[in-house]
Image (cartoon, helix red, strand yellow):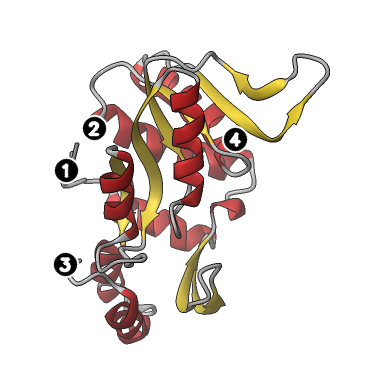
Amino acid sequence: MKHQIESNWEHEFLEFAISSGALRFGEFNLKSGRLSPYFFNTGLFNNGALLSILSRFYAKMLNTVEQQPFMLFGPAYKGIPLVATVATALAEEYNRVVPFAFNRKEIKDHGEGGLIIGAKLTGRVVIVDDVVTAGTSATQAAELITAAGATPVALAIALDREEKGISDVTVTDEIRNRLDIDVHSIAKFSSLIKHLREIPLLSDNVPLLEAYHALYGASQS
C-alpha cells in the first residue's frame, strides 16, 4: 500500500510553517537524542487562525490522496485537536463528512467511560499526527483501531523528516512496511531544502541541514 503523489502545496505550507514560527532553525535536542539544526512543532499553531490554516493543508492533502470514504483518528494528545479541525476543514472545503475519534491516555471508569472518544471506529481509518520520530504513536493507534474492528489505512503527518529509524530506511517507510499502511505528508525534508535555497535570509541553514541529513537521513531519501 504505497500511494505517493507529487504535492503542489508543499512550498505554501513550508512558507506558512516558517512564518508562523512552528518551523525553527537553531540547535534542538530531539526525543530521539539527536541534535537537530531545525525543529517543527505543531503545538505552536496555538490559536484558532493558525490551527484553521494548518487543518486546511491536511484536508487538501487528504481530499487528494484518499478518494474512498474514511474516518479520522487522533492519538492523544496532539492528534486530538487535529482530527477535530481537519474533519471540520474537510466538511467546509470539500463537502466531505468525515467522522473522527481520539483516545485517552488512561481508561475512564465513569461517565461515558472507555478509552476512545468520538465516533465509533469502523471502516477505513486515517491516523492524524504531526510528525513521526520512532513510529510508536502510530503503532499504538493502529493497534487500537484494529482492536475495535476497523482498518488503519494511512497515517497523515505534517512534515516527513525523511530520517532513518532502526534500519537504513526512513521511519515512514518502516511504518509503511510494519503496519501495511500509507503515510501521507504535507511536506518533506527534501522539499524544505529546496525551499530554503530560494530564501536568501534562510539559505545559510542549508549546509547545516544537509550535514545533519548526511548523518541521519536514509540512504534512498
Kindly indicate whether the residue at mark 4 contacts the one at mark 3 (C-beta within 8 angstroms). no
Q: Residues within 10 Å of mark 3 (few under 14, many from 20)?
A: few
Q: Are marks 3 and 2 in contact (CB under 8 Å)?
A: no
Q: Are marks 2 and 1 in contact (CB under 8 Å)?
A: yes
Q: Which residue is mark 1?
A: 5
Tell me the SS state at disc 4. helix
Location of residue 188 with respect to 151 vertically, above or below: below
> For mark 1, does the 10 Å Cα neighbourhood hold few (<14), some (14 to 19), or many (20 or more) residues?
few
Percent from the top left, x then y, of residue 183? 30, 43
Q: Estimate the spatial distance between the alpha carbons at disc 1 and disc 3, rounded to whole Å.
A: 17 Å
Q: Which residue is mark 3?
A: 220
Which numbered disc covers residue 80? Answer: 4
- In whole angstroms, how far apart are the C-alphas of marks 2 and 1? 8 Å
Of labels 3 and 4, earlier in sequence is 4
Foreground mark, 1 or 3, reads 3
Q: Nearer the viewer, mark 3 or mark 4?
A: 3
Q: Residue at x 49, y 18 (%)?
A: 121
Q: Give the distance between the C-alpha atoms of the residues marked 1 and 4, in whole angstroms.
A: 26 Å
Instruction: Please rate how many residues cluster around mark 4, counting C-alpha atoms within 10 Å: few if below 14, some from 14 to 19, many from 20.
Output: many
Amino acid type at image mark 4: Ile
Instruction: Kindly indicate whether the residue at mark 3 contacts the one at mark 1 (C-beta within 8 angstroms).
Output: no
* In the displayed structure image, the side of residue 90 where residue 65 appears, left or right: left
Badge 2 element: helix
Q: Position of residue 88 (x, y in %)?
A: 50, 23
Q: Which residue does the numbered mark 2 point to in the structure image?
A: 65
Residue placed at 53% from the left, 75% from the top?
33
Q: Residue at x 31, y 77 (%)?
A: 213
Residue 154 locus on image (x, y percent): 33, 35
N-terminal label among 2 and 1 = 1
